[in-house]
Amino acid sequence: MNARDVARRLPDIATLRNLCRSMAMLDAILQPGAPYLRHHRFDAHWSPTQELASMDNGGGDTYSIVFSAAGAYIRGFDHASPMSPYAGDGMPWPGVVDTVPAVFRSCVEEPAFHLDGIAHITVCLWRENTDGHWRTGEVDFEGGRLVPDGSDWLFRRLVEGTPETYQAWAQRYYRTPVDLDAVIDVYELRPLTSELVVALNPTVTLEQFGDAIASIGYRA
């Protein structure tokens, strides 16, 4: 699976935003004491006009999704991909960001998505609110062969989009049983209750998550 496959399989912007909020809220409950160890995050107040969903696996692989009035912009970075700027001249792989429309160019240049002036990007997708589908660049693959851009695993939970997929991943990542019914409730954005929080993590209380709820824009 590459960026073009992801573009065909991603849900619409509103559904994707809700999915990102759900995963961020679940991660906050499952990993309450160490926010930096959370895999998925959501900042509903990233800027006055933008929200940011992000994933960081702690090993140098990340994605960011900027939601704005214009639509949504996605950049992913697989540090081991041969498409990494570090594997070449320090510039994004030809075609990855060349055709990103003007309305999202500020996202391409966003300093938070760079390190020491080098863009952390191997895959890019976008969708304006007026678009009927997700778009991606005309990537220049060497000799016509498919070069892995990281899409096949970076966006798997977004593409599959099911509570079962998240539960299976979370049980491996957090090394603890994860209640599927509780995951379903959060995926459906049902209000958090003490019972729901305890079903996911019996060591915490609802009152601990006021800041996380506000940051994610979830409703309690």
Image (cartoon, rainbow, N blue to C red):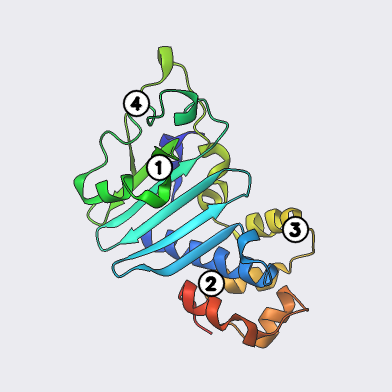
> From mark 3 to mark 1, how far is it between C-alphas?
28 Å
Using a 10 Å C-alpha cutoff, classify the residue at mark 3 as few (fewer than 14 neighbours), some (14 to 19) or many (20 or more): some
> From mark 2 to mark 1, how far is it between C-alphas?
23 Å
Residue 79 spot, x, y in % from top left: 55, 35
Label annotation for residue 171: 3
Label annotation for residue 94: 4
Work out whether residue 11 can be spotted: no
**Which residue corresponds to mark 1?**
7
> From mark 4 to mark 3, how far is it between C-alphas?
38 Å
Mark closer to the chain start, 2 or 4: 4
Work out whether residue 183 can be spotted: yes
Secondary structure under the numbered disc 1 in the rendered image: helix
Label annotation for residue 188: 2
Using a 10 Å C-alpha cutoff, classify the residue at mark 1 as few (fewer than 14 neighbours), some (14 to 19) or many (20 or more): some
Q: Are marks 2 and 1 in contact (CB under 8 Å)?
A: no
Mark closer to the chain start, 2 or 3: 3
Please state if 1 lies on the left or on the right of 201 as rendered: left
> From mark 1 to mark 4, how far is it between C-alphas?
18 Å
Mark closer to the chain start, 4 or 3: 4
